[in-house]
Amino acid sequence: MVAKRFHSLEARDNWVGYALLTPAILIFVMITGFPVVFSITMSFFRWRPTETANPFVGFNNYLRVFANPSFLLSLRNTFLYAFGGAFFKVLLGLGLALLLNQKFKGRGIARTLLMLPWIVPITASLTSWNWMFDGMYGIFNIILMRLGIISESINFLGQKGTALVCVMTAGIWLGYPQIMVMILAGLQAITVEQYEAAKLEGATPFQVFFRITLPSLSGVMKTAIILSVIWTFNAFNVIWLLTRGGPSNSTHVMNTLAYELSFVNMKYDQGAAMSVSILIMLAVFLFIYTKMQKENEAQ
């Protein structure tokens, strides 16, 4: 009788919880779920703002997107931007986290300064980067010319060879603080006794790093890498605000190309097909991330 009453009270509490969650779930579905379903549906129809009829076209929108000369370029740039950016973010984040994990005078100030890319509004940050890369008055041109490395100004954001490198640099600067904080938290979870035991055994700093620090950070590093890839893969702000996909579409990634197809060229159907393609790729990365999380929890 007692067990039955406890079970009923527990069930009642669960139903109360579900009732309280229902409004939030409905809002989430309306804000997130409906646009996703609508985009998937739109990708299978011809959908233009100047046409009243929306005939079913099957996979034609996907075929047109994949046949677009800019698609392969944007796909290459997306993977280069995502994996290249993730590599340097993790590398920079690891180095700075190791530095901040040490005790030195002014460590609090250093932590604050290194968090600035995360704190400063992205529009303000990218405006500053745009000015620094400026072809006439940018600080990089001024420094290089005064050092005698170049004899005339370089339009960094206006040339194919430098534009993608510039947007990657800005993206790495904006993204490393998150990785740094994650790795720093992992470093502080390593017990001091492990380092003291290694010193007593005569281990060098090199051996301590590769035999204690790095193995202890393996779970955090895996998570940091996959999250960085997901964040960077889904990037839009940096590239659109700095170059708008130019010059000659050389910095287009899949997100900016989808935006251009939809809201510049008014090809909503092809933009939707591009967005769905991005969603599928992100779902793969999310599956990998979830699997890694389960493996870490099992360990």
Image (spheres, helix red, strand yellow):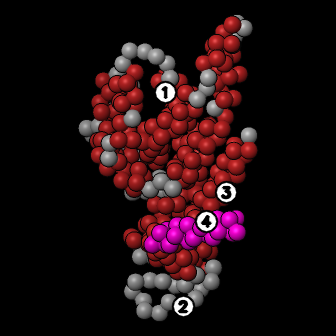
Q: Which residue position is annotated with label 2? A: 55
| Neighbour tally class for label 2: few under 14, some 14-19, many 20 plus, Cα within 10 Å | few
Looking at the rendered structure, the secondary structure element under dot 1 is: helix
Q: Residue 167 lies in what quarter of the image? A: top left
Secondary structure found at label 2: loop
Helix, strand, or loop for circle 3? helix
- Mark 3–mark 4 Cα distance, whole angstroms, equals 33 Å
Comes first in the chain, label 2 or label 1: 2
Evaluate whether residue 161 shows in this view: yes
Instruction: Provide residue 86's location: percent of width, then percent of height.
Output: 56, 42
Q: Magenta residues, as a range?
A: 1-23
Q: Earlier in the sequence, mark 3 or mark 2?
A: 2
Q: Identity of the amino acid at label 3?
A: Phe
Labelled disc at residue 287:
3
Distance from Cα at disc 3 to Cα at disc 2? 34 Å
Q: Nearer the viewer, mark 4 or mark 1?
A: 4
Q: Amino acid at mark 4?
A: Glu
Q: Residue furthest bottom?
A: 53
Q: Which residue is mark 1?
A: 96
Q: Nearer the viewer, mark 2 or mark 1?
A: 1
In the rendered image, residue 134, in percent from the top left (x then y), is placed at 31, 42
Q: Earlier in the sequence, mark 2 or mark 4?
A: 4
- Against 137, residue 290 (above or below) is below
**Which one is in front in this view, the residue at disc 2 or the one at disc 4?**
4
Amino acid type at image mark 2: Pro
The numbered mark, 1 or 3, whose residue comes first in the sequence reads 1
Q: Which residue is mark 4?
A: 10
Residue depicted at 49% across the width and 68% down the height: 21
Residue 184's place in the image compared with 72, above or below, is: above
